[in-house]
Image (cartoon, grey):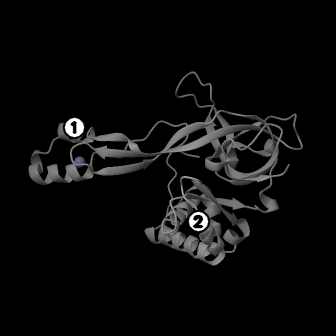
Amino acid sequence: MSEERHIPGPPSELADTLNHWRELFQRKHSEDFEALKGLTGMEDPIFSFLVDYADIDDDDLLSLRFNEYPEQTVEQANEVLRSMCSEHTDVRCVLRPLFFPDEKLKHVSSLRMRNRGELVSLVVKIQDVGPRLGYLKKALYTCIACGHREEVPQRVARERKRPIGPCRVCLEDAQQTLGEQFSYSLYKRLDSLLQLTAEGSFYQDIQYLNVHDAIAPDEQPIQIIIDDEYVDRHKPGETIRINGVVYIDPIPDRNFVKDTRRILQVRALSIEQVS
Ligand SMILES: [Zn+2]
């Protein structure tokens, strides 16, 4: 996946996607909202919102968006869930799309670089489970002069990204006051006002699994990235079905930063227990 993969289309398309998710949840998941009413974030920090792939597929817009931009579309669904659930509970709801159709089933050995960004389903046996890690998923930057805050989404295993340009509030202020006298050095100074704030930044639990294709254990394994409630839930030897997105990642033990070699990974969107 490229570093800057953005979603094309007018803002109304985003609004439509959010509305379609909201409508699907209202139509198919009233029981989940009922179940959430008794839960608190202290006891159950995460609630898996299990959504049938067929329900997504029945909605033309969601089906298109989910297949084209799976991760962004799931993030948008999570946004909708956040606003819908906040009335009932402080538990964090996480969308887990399940029951991918058989046409998504692939063998590990058939995956190639050209498959990156695609939705796939793999039946695999866990070889080993990596340590529990955290990654900075959303960095919060705060302006030390005016207190303006900006959130910057981050990617796993990539350099941390800063907001683009200086604090907007201070920049406008300075431009209005100084007009023509506004200088580049002042711009640079304003840029340094935005600083990473640990409190308010969001860290997500993740874990890497090394897995083999369940029916071809002698072939090359692949790395799976799992997150949130799936972390620390699985053991070597288990057979699971991973529904996820094909990622490419720099090789883990690269010894120079701009190494161009890449490996394939699958970012799990959901996991089904097989045995
Ligand atoms: Zn500012």
Q: Judge whether 57 appears above or below 230 on screen.
A: below
Q: Judge whether 242 appears above or below 219 on screen.
A: below
Q: Residue at x 48, y 65 (%)?
A: 86
Residue that carries the numbered disc 1 in the rendered image: 189
- Nearer mark to the viewer, of 2 and 1: 2
The residue type indicated by label 1 comes to: Arg
Residue 61 in view, yes or no: no
x, y percent for residue 171:
21, 49
Query: Between residues 5 and 105, which one lies in front from this camera angle?
Result: 105
Q: To which quarter of the image does residue 217 belong?
A: top right
Q: To which quarter of the image does residue 20 belong?
A: bottom right
Query: Between residues 162 and 183, which one lies in front from this camera angle?
Result: 162
x, y percent for residue 163:
36, 46
x, y percent for residue 132:
62, 36
Residue 136 in view, yes or no: yes
Disc 2 from disc 1: Cα separation: 50 Å
Residue 93 relative to residue 235: left or right: left
The residue type indicated by label 2 comes to: Gly
Q: Residue at x 69, y 71 (%)?
A: 55
Query: Between residues 166 and 25, which one lies in front from this camera angle?
Result: 25
Q: Judge whether 59 appears above or below 231 on screen.
A: below
Q: To which quarter of the image does residue 101 belong?
A: bottom right
Q: Judge whether 208 appears above or below 11 on screen.
A: above
Q: Residue furthest bottom?
A: 27
x, y percent for residue 214:
86, 44
Residue 242 relative to residue 145: left or right: right
Residue 124 relative to residue 9: left or right: right
Neighbours of disc 2 within 10 Å: few (<14), some (14-19), many (20+): few
Residue that carries the numbered disc 2 in the rendered image: 38
Q: Is mark 1 within 8 Å of ligand 1?
A: no
